[in-house]
Amino acid sequence: MKIIPDEKKLEIIKVLQQKGVNRPCPKCNHNNFTLLDGYFNQVIQPELKGITLSGPAVPSVVTVCTNCGYISQHALGVLGLMPAGEEKK
């Protein structure tokens, strides 16, 4: 089962490339990355003590270096990829 449809993945990859996210891995200098089939949703923590599981968050897509596994997150809002009506300013 695909979480992100192929057409949406292509759109995400196109936007990342337009933003210049096409340089080698900063850890191993490898050139190949894969886009994870899903989204990350980083909840903004109101304080350092404890863990909050809901509230304001930063939805993102994740690329992974296919050589060393380095993970890079990219915020959907900044990329202009948030679904209509879901982006808060």
Image (spheres, grey):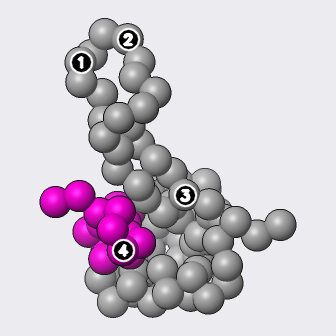
Residue 85 sits inside the magenta stretch: yes
Q: Nearer the viewer, residue 63 or 4?
A: 4
* Occupied quadrant, residue 46: top left
Q: Quadrant of the C terminus?
A: bottom left
Q: Amino acid at mark 2?
A: Gly
Q: How far apart, in angstroms, are the residues tagged by discs 4 and 3?
A: 17 Å
Is 73 on the left or on the right of 46, as rendered? Answer: right
Q: Residue 62 colored magenta? A: no
Q: Say which label, 4 or 3, has the lower sequence index.
A: 3
Q: Residue at x 54, y 58 (%)?
A: 39
**In the rendered image, which residue does mark 1 sit on?**
47
User: Within 10 Å of the Cα at label 2, are there few (<14), some (14-19), or many (20+) other Cα atoms?
Assistant: few
Say which label, 3 or 2, has the lower sequence index.
3
Looking at this rendering, what residue extends furthest in the front direction?
85
Query: Does 68 sit left or right of 63 as displayed?
Result: right
Instruction: Name the residue at 35% across, 44% down.
Output: 57
- The residue furthest top is 49
> Which residue position is annotated with label 2?
50
Instruction: Look at mark 3 in the image and give the residue it sits on.
Output: 39
What amino acid is found at the position of numbered circle 4 in the picture? Ala
